[in-house]
Image (cartoon, helix red, strand yellow):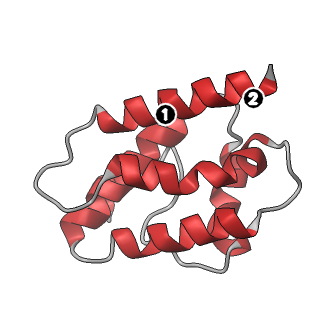
Amino acid sequence: MSKHVSSIWIMGMLIFAMSFNYGESAFSCDEAVKKLMPCQPFLEGAANGVTVQCCDGARSLDQLGKSNPEEVKAMCQCLKNAAAAATGVNPDRAKQLPGLCNINLPVPIDPNVNCDRL
């Protein structure tokens, strides 16, 4: 049952992420969300720590939005919407992810971030 719920959650997040138009930037919201999927057990509290696969995905996400300010804003809006829509994801754990993976994301993973101030 847990696998089935996780699959539904992943598909829902991907559909949700792809439904947003982020302008002409090369940033892909669905790609960003896919890269964070290995982090799901940690984000939901089912795992005590992050995995190598989770940090690899977060690390590659770190590179997606560094090209220009429009991509940073698009990434911010994508992660903000994904964080707000995700049921079962602990926002405090999402905020811990960059530190645990030793990366410096250009935007916070926070449903309350103001993307216009980046």
Horizontally, is 107 left or right of 70 in the view?
right
- Indicate the position of residue 35 as horizontal and vertical percent values: 51, 57
Name above or below for residue 68 compared with residue 79: below
Write down the quadrant of residue 102 in the picture.
bottom right
Query: Is the residue marked by circle 2 packed among few (<14), some (14-19), or many (20+) residues within 10 Å?
Result: few
Give the residue at the far left of this rendering. 24
Q: Position of residue 64 (x, y in %)?
A: 36, 69
Badge 2 is on which residue?
3
Q: Which amino acid does label 1 sit on?
A: Met
Residue placed at 66% from the left, 45% from the top?
Answer: 91
Residue found at the very far right of the displayed protein: 48
**Label 1 SS:** helix
* Numbered disc total: 2
Give the residue at x 51% y 35%.
84
Comparing 97 with 60, the one in front is 60
Q: Report the Cα–Cα distance between label 1 and label 2.
A: 15 Å
Above or below — where is 84 with respect to 48?
Answer: above
The quarter of the picture where the C terminus appears is: bottom left
Please state which of the two labelled residues, at mark 1 or mark 2, is closer to the viewer. 2
Residue topped by disc 1: 13
